[in-house]
Image: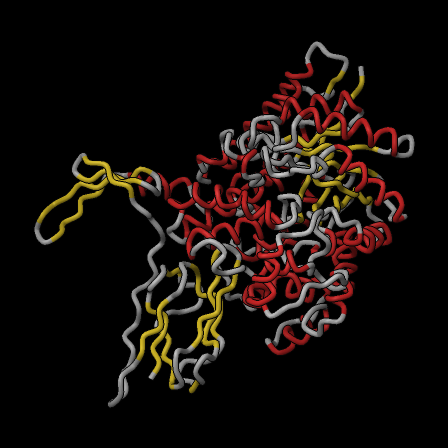
Amino acid sequence: MKKVNFMLTAFRDGFQSAYGARVLTKDFMPAVEAARHAGITHMEFGGGARFQALFFYCNENAFDMMDTFRKTAGPDANLQTLARGVNVVGLESQSSDVIKAHAQLFKKHGTTTIRNFDALNDVNNLIYSGKCIVEAGLKHEITVTMMSLAPGWDTTGTIHTPEFYEKVLRKILDSGVPFDSVCFKDASGTATPATVGRTIAIARKMLPQGTKIAFHTHETAGNSIACCLEAIHAGADQLDLSFQPVSGGTCQPDVLTMWHALRGTDYTLDIDPHKIREAENVFQECMSKYESLGEAGRVLPIIPFSPLPGGALTANTQMMRDNGTFNRFPEVVEAMGECVKLGGFGTSVTPVSQFYIQQAYTNVMQGAWKKITPGYGKMVLGYFGKTPVEPDPMVVKAASEQLGLEPTAKTPLEINDADPKKGLKPAIEKLKAAGLPVTDENAFIVATCADKGITFLKGEAKVNGIRWAKQKQDANAPVCVNVNGTAYQVEFDGDNAAVVNGKRYDISLGKAAPAAKTATKPASGAADTINAPVPGAILRFSVKDGDTVKEGQEILVMEAMKMETSVNAPKAGTVTFLVKQGDQVQTGHPVAQIQ
């Protein structure tokens, strides 16, 4: 029988796909130990969203998490991370020194293998990052990203087909970039079994004998087991599999499910299913304190028509819940399809999937194409590399006008290396200005996490955005509300409905911002109130409370859906803030007054 190898994704992609990557280290280490005892030696343990999310939400240092994981998994485990080409572990592309530091630091903190991908399948974005990975002494798994297109999207029949992926692989081979293995990565789980099988069969003939082929998918669209079977029949050596409660749905198929699917065939995972069951039980107990999001645990038939990846789905639904806009999720998914079609058909995987959903979210909340979001706009203008096909001219024109940028054919590395605001040097300057220790790790954290990295290193961050199971239970308990002497029994049904005295109502439920402080009004003259233009969090202040500002000057920056939105002064005067950093506010909430 042929042994099919697998990588356990539960502790990286599983967390990202089921919990928006917001899981504390101490809570899952017993499951890592259990997986080790079950004989699993290849595990995904960091990178991707599990780098930034630890600083943004968990108030943890991702490098410390990696060190703890390595100690628990043992010295011989193959621990793998995920990198986004020239973006490495950020949503923005990086300069050469940051890309090199990424490989060196991840090697230092326990990594064995780095899977390296580019959402646009622009091989130029993989060459330098791949060389850095190999030079750091790590195994380099280079990646071709996949997805399917909904009917009618591609009138040429040449985009995201087996022949399309063959051309990408040919460019990889012709580039001379060193690699140890090749992964075909379908982050949205939308590629059809036929396409997967034909693609891997082509790759097996093209690659040097003995080259390992890995296949990665998600169950989101319901095709994962069928695609995995086609992949191994066509010559794939490895599958990505997971553990309950982060298997199926938006995640990878379960180890035991795949084991069962292979029973009676010429293939085997070569596992002890009883030990795997024991490990999964430990993991489920570890994760019982976290809320299970409904959309994470089921197949979503709409996904093939709007390829929203499992890893991005729950991260964004959590942010929409935080912002009180989750009721608009079906509209956002529907709008995402148009963003893919007009944006050049880059694969829906980070960061491009985030660009798609940010633009879709903005189109729904502010009107279709009224505002081009920075990430999406820069993508169609070429600042993240070359899209598979040319983006729609209307979108390119709007992006250029709104962002004040011309389309470019330069590579991201050329652009970033020439940008004085990017790289380790400005990050070190920020560390010094904040009075923080200058270390290789701290410089990298600031380079990839920007202001939130500084906030974390200063000890000003806090655990936030994690959805605990207890919170959900408390929220669903009936409460008695008295309004003007009349009693109402209110019971919440999730975030979208409430039952009041037995009658059901649709609602939009979000976190309430702290009550605005009372501004000290000047003795004379009228003060203008400045309201939040979008729901989101107060990210940073651009001026100090009491400063005199000019008309149109930026006074603070908000963050929603991983996008920054500037709030500007409507007139010249003295500004008084009504919120504090980290506050979650809704559209129209007073954030400042100006006199």
Q: How many numbered dots are placed on residues in this image?
A: 0
Residue 540: x and y, percent? 49, 70
Q: Could you say which is closer to the camera, residue 152 or residue 414?
A: 152
Q: Could you say which is closer to the camera, residue 262 or residue 230?
A: 230
Residue 243: x and y, percent? 59, 30
The quadrant where residue 456 appears: bottom right
Answer left or right for 79 relative to 537.
right
The quadrant where residue 585 appears: bottom left
Vertical order, 390 against 431 (above or below) = above
Q: Could you say which is closer to the camera, residue 418 or residue 346?
A: 346
Can the viewer see residue 23?
Answer: no
**Residue positioned most to the bottom:** 524
The quadrant where residue 450 appears: bottom right
Can the viewer see residue 410?
Answer: yes
Residue at x 39%, y 78% (from the top left corner): 570
Residue at x 44%, y 65% (from the top left corner): 538
Quarter of the image with the N terminus in it:
top right
Answer left or right for 136 relative to 161.
right
Q: Could you say which is closer to the camera, residue 285 or residue 365?
A: 365
* Colouring method of the image: secondary structure
Vertical order, 521 against 254 (above or below) = below
**Residue positioned most to the left:** 485
Answer left or right for 83 relative to 256.
right
Residue 28: x and y, percent? 57, 40
Vertical order, 68 against 540 (above or below) = above
Quarter of the image with the C terminus in it:
bottom left
Vertical order, 531 against 133 (above or below) = below
Residue 34: x and y, percent? 63, 32
Residue at x 68%, y 32% (from the top left corner): 240
